[in-house]
Image (cartoon, helix red, strand yellow):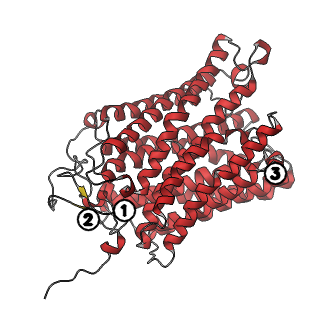
């Protein structure tokens, strides 16, 4: 990938982990790597909250009558689950953690373009999350994670204000992160790092950053409008005073469908790095995969109304959005086909990151195919507001994105920490996650097709068997999430020293030490080769006789 002007010392004096000590140095740090770890702690905390709510939801659905909690408490649980998991884990985790840590390393930069802005992004995220914690502690919110009007503007409890403002503040964190990444990729690439020498990871994160910058302001202003209508009585969405309830739907989904690709595009970038490394091949159709990331970002802004087929939009609009929703599957399919051709005749090894990559491809493909089904008007009218929708977006957003994040976390863990984890436990966890996820959510496709509505705290007795199976699968899935937490934390102290490049991977990040230097590189790297030049990496070294 590159020729370094200077040879790195075997035991450099300062890494980003030990250059400064004390909590204050971390809370005031401008090092992109440390900020990435701050995001790890914050997003993991919110994942635990959202996961706990999910576990309680599944336990309540064990029996048709929903005896565990009352209907009102159940409404609050699934609202909190959705708000926390979408806005405080799924959207920020891959960009804020892996993007922050890796983008400067992968392009040969010493940091992001705006280090202080990067730290401010983390503090805004924490402030927004604190408002959500306030909402939970003082009674929760029961308007759903979609804040549908008039539920969020006129009825139910008053914690809608704190929940909406939490999302508003966290939205600025996303915007600043997106701006930072875009400027960093444009301005701080190492000499010789042309656009078509960039790792595909960078292309995916660049596309996701565009969505951050263009779509997030819409959800932020939507939350402000809800607060204004609720607090000041201004007629924005209420038709009795001149408002339009469909306006909120358009505003919310204009952000929320591109947000799906904010979640999945980083996972796609991770897939390209992992599959190329563990297949020992250059990614098949590099240019097509790169432009497909941009295509996904562009198409994502033209499909929002497929969430509104039953909400009174015109037939003509519905047909247009149905067609656009099907077309957005094309760039996604390009990636899956190209990853498959990359693996063809490759020297594949089934290490933990690669198993998570297989999980990503399988789960995302199921989610994508069911998405095409839902783009069909007839199918969507039948399946909207059923558990089929729940299964679909969990296959895409949780199955795909979390599998991608776990693949990336395991792939770059030796670089982040300088330590290896237990490969046997890693493979076991990846297998458990895949099995548990399918046991949890595939029955929900059947439940939805049979007509079980989502968001209900009770259901007819004939649906109990599939709900019990889904809850049992959730128990297996929980083990798949807990196991990596155990062995990754264990590896911090007891793991084998990783070395600079344990996977023999291509990329500038593997040319510096593990964990990286505070300054990332001793000298500016010079890029002289294309990305994923595994043929040269794996070629035998001929020693002159």
Q: Which residue was labeled with disc 3?
A: 379
Can residue 357 be seen at all in this image of the molecule? yes
Residue at 70% across / 31% down in the picture? 249
Task: Please state if 25 lies on the left or on the right of 201 as rendered.
Answer: left
Q: Which mark is residue 499?
A: 2
Position of 507 with respect to 375 (left or right) is: left
Q: CA distance from mark 1 to mark 3?
A: 42 Å
Q: Which residue is mark 1?
A: 531
Question: Could you say whether the residue bearing mark 3 is in a helix, strand or loop?
Answer: helix
Report the residue at 28% width, 41% height from top.
Answer: 31
Local crowd at mark 1 within 10 Å, few (<14), some, or many (≥20)? many
Q: Earlier in the sequence, mark 1 or mark 3?
A: 3
| SS of the residue under disc 1 | loop
Chain-order first, disc 2 or disc 3: 3
Where 466 falls versus 28 (above or below)?
below
Mark toward the viewer: 1 or 2 = 1
């Amino acid at each position: 990938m590159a020729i370094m002007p200077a040879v790195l010392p075997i035991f450099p004096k300062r890494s980003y982990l030990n250059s400064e000590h004390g909590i204050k140095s971390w809370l005031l740090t401008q090092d992109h790597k440390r900020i990435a770890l701050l995001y790890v702690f914050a997003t993991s905390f919110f994942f635990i909250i959202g996961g706990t709510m999910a576990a309680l939801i599944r336990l309540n659905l064990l029996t048709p009558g929903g005896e565990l909690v009352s209907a009102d408490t159940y409404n609050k649980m699934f609202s909190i689950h959705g708000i926390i998991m979408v806005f405080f884990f799924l959207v920020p985790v891959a960009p804020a953690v892996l993007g922050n840590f890796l983008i400067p390393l992968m392009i040969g930069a010493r940091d992001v373009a705006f280090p202080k802005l990067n730290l401010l992004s983390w503090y805004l995220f924490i402030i927004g999350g604190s408002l959500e914690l306030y909402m939970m502690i003082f009674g929760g919110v029961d308007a759903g994670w979609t804040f549908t009007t008039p539920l969020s503007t006129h009825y139910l409890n008053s914690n809608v204000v704190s929940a909406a403002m939490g999302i508003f503040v966290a939205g600025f964190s996303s915007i600043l992160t997106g701006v930072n990444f875009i400027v960093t990729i444009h301005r701080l690439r190492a000499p010789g790092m042309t656009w078509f020498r960039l790792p595909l990871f960078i292309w995916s994160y660049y596309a996701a950053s565009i969505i951050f910058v263009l779509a997030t302001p819409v959800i932020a202003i939507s939350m402000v409008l809800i607060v204004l209508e609720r607090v000041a009585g201004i007629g924005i969405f209420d038709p009795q005073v001149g408002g339009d309830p469909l306006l909120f739907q358009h505003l919310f989904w204009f952000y929320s469908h591109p947000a799906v690709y904010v979640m999945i595009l980083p996972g796609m970038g991770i897939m390209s790095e992992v599959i190329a490394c563990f297949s020992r091949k250059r990614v098949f159709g590099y240019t097509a995969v790169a432009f497909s990331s941009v295509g996904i970002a562009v198409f994502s802004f033209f499909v929002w109304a497929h969430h509104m087929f039953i909400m009174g939009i015109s037939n003509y609009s519905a047909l247009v959005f149905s067609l656009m929703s099907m077309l957005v599957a094309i760039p996604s399919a390009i990636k899956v086909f190209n990853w498959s051709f990359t693996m063809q005749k490759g020297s594949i090894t089934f290490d933990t990151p690669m198993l998570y990559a297989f999980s990503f491809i399988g789960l995302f493909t199921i989610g994508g195919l069911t998405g095409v089904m839902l783009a069909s008007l007839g199918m969507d009218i039948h399946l909207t507001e059923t558990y089929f929708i729940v299964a679909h977006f969990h296959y895409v957003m949780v199955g795909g994105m979390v599998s991608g994040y776990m693949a990336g976390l395991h792939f770059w863990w030796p670089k982040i920490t300088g330590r290896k984890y237990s490969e046997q436990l890693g493979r076991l966890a990846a297998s458990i996650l895949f099995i548990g996820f399918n046991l949890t959510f595939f029955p929900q496709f059947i439940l939805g097709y049979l007509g079980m509505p989502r968001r209900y705290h009770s259901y007819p007795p004939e649906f109990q068997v599939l709900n019990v199976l889904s809850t049992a699968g959730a128990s297996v899935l929980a083990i798949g999430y807990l196991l990596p937490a155990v062995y990754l934390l264990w590896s911090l102290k007891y793991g084998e020293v990783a070395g600079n490049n344990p996977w023999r991977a291509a990329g500038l990040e593997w040319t510096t030490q593990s964990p990286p230097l505070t300054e990332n590189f001793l000298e500016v790297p010079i890029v002289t080769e294309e990305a994923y030049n595994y043929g040269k990496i794996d070629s035998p070294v001929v020693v002159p006789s």
